[in-house]
């Protein structure tokens, strides 16, 4: 099935007309919509309570628990969108990759992919592999009502980095060695991951997600020439695979100031911007025809309220002429963030941008 032949998701009119989805489509909004990456997580005491004693990957596979965690920041903060609670390695675990998320470390892969024979670990993902996702999104969309739900997945490069390195890395020496030294193997690896990622996003959209975000968390480690040659084709394949559903597609990476134009070229409708590049400059680099998302430095939330509001106004002023703007942090909510600071921030953005 081609992207153009893909079935369009039947979106309820209420989420469709939300401020978040209007901003994604670059339409007039009643206020600048707000949501936070990692808004459902360790900064919330109610999250820590329901996750107590439950390993991360197990928590991602329990629909009732996923539903509760996803709803928590919507109830507490009044954000304009929920993001599905999961982890970028869930689809890899679902197809049988031997991995675990170790506390204080992150995803650890038992048998890293280093040779062509290792690619056999990567079979196709089917909806049956992640039936708990379909069930959880069904529960969520009924509870959320007019609030849109964002589905997400890890981008091929970031997933490849974990698979080749065997876990988190600061230098990505093994992944880059494969990319430079065996470009055919690298391309085949990313192509397979693009198919798995696209399948995972399709499951979420068909279950009722109103938008999807592709996290390329570690793409900022790449030079633009390497990104264009060795990464962009796989990310573009993911976006093209879900284009026919008609839901907004968001593309985000950390430290990607030099890649913003290329990330826009990959095919997303919205480009996420971290805190290093002002929104107006990011818009110049990306070019017209895209909404932007971002980009308050997450550490600003540890400052006094007056400082948070001042820095927030800097972001809003920088974004005032954008075709569409979704307020977010420049990366995820840090675990020790005061939840009340997030609630105040949502209210401040809504109040200052009310049309």
Image (cartoon, rainbow, N blue to C red):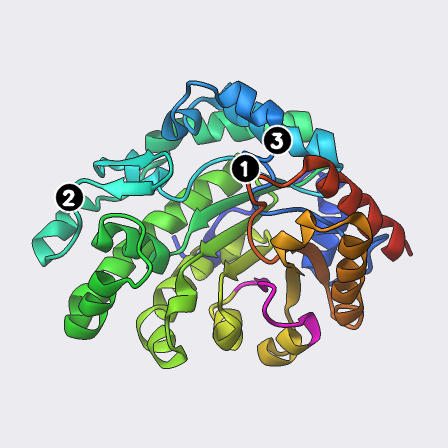
Q: Position of residue 294 (x, y in %)?
A: 65, 60
Q: Is residue 175 placed above or below 167 in the rendered structure?
A: below
Q: CA distance from mark 2 to mark 1?
A: 28 Å
Above or below — where is 5 with respect to 131?
below
State yes or no: discs 3 and 1 in contact (Cβ < 8 Å): no
The residue lying at 67 percent from left, 41 percent from top is 148
Q: Earlier in the sequence, mark 2 or mark 1?
A: 1
Q: Looking at the image, which is closer to me, 334 or 145?
A: 334
- Residue under pointer 1: 84
> Is tag 3's residue or tag 2's residue first in the polypeptide sequence?
3
Tell me: 350 left or right of 155: right
Residue under circle 3?
Answer: 44
Q: Which contiguous range is marked in magenta?
A: 268-280
Viewer-side residue, 272 vs 129: 272
Mark 3, other Cα within 10 Å: few <14 / some 14–19 / many ≥20: many
Prevailing secondary structure class for the magenta stretch in the rendered image: loop
Q: Which residue is the extreme one toward the right?
A: 355
Residue 304 image offset from top left, x and y in percent: 76, 49
Quadrant of the rendered image containing residue 177:
bottom left
- Percent position (x, y) of residue 329? 63, 54
Distance of label 3 from label 2 (alpha carbons): 34 Å
Residue under pointer 2: 111
Residue at the image position 21 percent from the left and 36 percent from the top? 98
Q: Is 133 situated left or right of 44 in this image?
A: left
Indicate whether 139 appears above or below 96: above
Question: Seen in the image, is 269 located left or right of residue 189?
Answer: right
* Residue 338 picture location, percent across and down: 67, 38
Find out whether residue 95 is within the magenta segment.
no
Q: Earlier in the sequence, mark 3 or mark 1?
A: 3
- Is there a contact, CB below 8 Å, between mark 3 and mark 2? no
Q: Nearer the viewer, mark 2 or mark 1?
A: 2
- Element carrying mark 1: loop
């Amino acid at each position: 099935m081609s992207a153009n032949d893909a079935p369009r998701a039947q979106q309820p009119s209420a989420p469709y007309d939300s401020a978040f989805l209007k901003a994604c489509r670059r339409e007039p909004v009643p206020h600048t919509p707000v949501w936070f990456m990692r808004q459902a997580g360790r900064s919330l005491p109610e999250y820590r309570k329901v996750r107590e004693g439950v390993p991360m990957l197990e928590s991602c596979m329990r629909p009732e628990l996923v539903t509760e965690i996803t709803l928590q920041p919507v109830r507490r903060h009044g954000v304009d969108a929920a993001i599905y609670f999961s982890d970028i390695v869930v689809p890899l675990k679902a197809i049988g990759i031997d991995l675990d998320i170790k506390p204080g470390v992150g995803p650890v892969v038992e048998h890293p992919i280093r040779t062509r024979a290792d690619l056999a670990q990567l079979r196709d993902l089917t909806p049956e592999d992640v039936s708990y996702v379909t069930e959880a999104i069904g529960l969520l969309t009924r509870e959320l009502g007019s609030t849109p739900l964002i589905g997400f997945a890890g981008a091929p490069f970031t997933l490849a980095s974990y698979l080749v390195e065997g876990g988190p890395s600061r230098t990505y020496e093994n992944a880059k060695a494969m990319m430079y030294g065996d470009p055919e193997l690298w391309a085949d690896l990313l192509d397979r991951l693009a198919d798995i990622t696209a399948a995972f996003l399709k499951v979420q959209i068909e279950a009722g997600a109103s938008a999807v975000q592709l996290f390329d968390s570690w793409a900022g480690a790449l030079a633009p020439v390497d990104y264009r040659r060795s990464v962009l084709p796989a990310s573009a394949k993911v976006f093209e695979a879900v284009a026919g559903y008609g839901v907004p597609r968001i593309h985000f990476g950390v430290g990607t100031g030099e890649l913003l134009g290329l990330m826009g070229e990959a095919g997303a409708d919205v480009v996420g911007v971290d805190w290093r590049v002002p929104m107006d400059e990011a818009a110049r680099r990306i070019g017209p025809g895209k909404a932007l998302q971002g980009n308050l430095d997450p550490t600003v939330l540890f400052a006094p309220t007056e400082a948070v509001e001042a820095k927030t106004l800097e972001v809003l002023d920088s974004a005032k002429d954008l075709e569409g703007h979704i307020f977010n942090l420049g990366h995820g909510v840090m675990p020790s963030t005061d939840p009340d600071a997030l609630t105040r921030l949502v209210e401040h953005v809504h109040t200052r941008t009310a049309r």
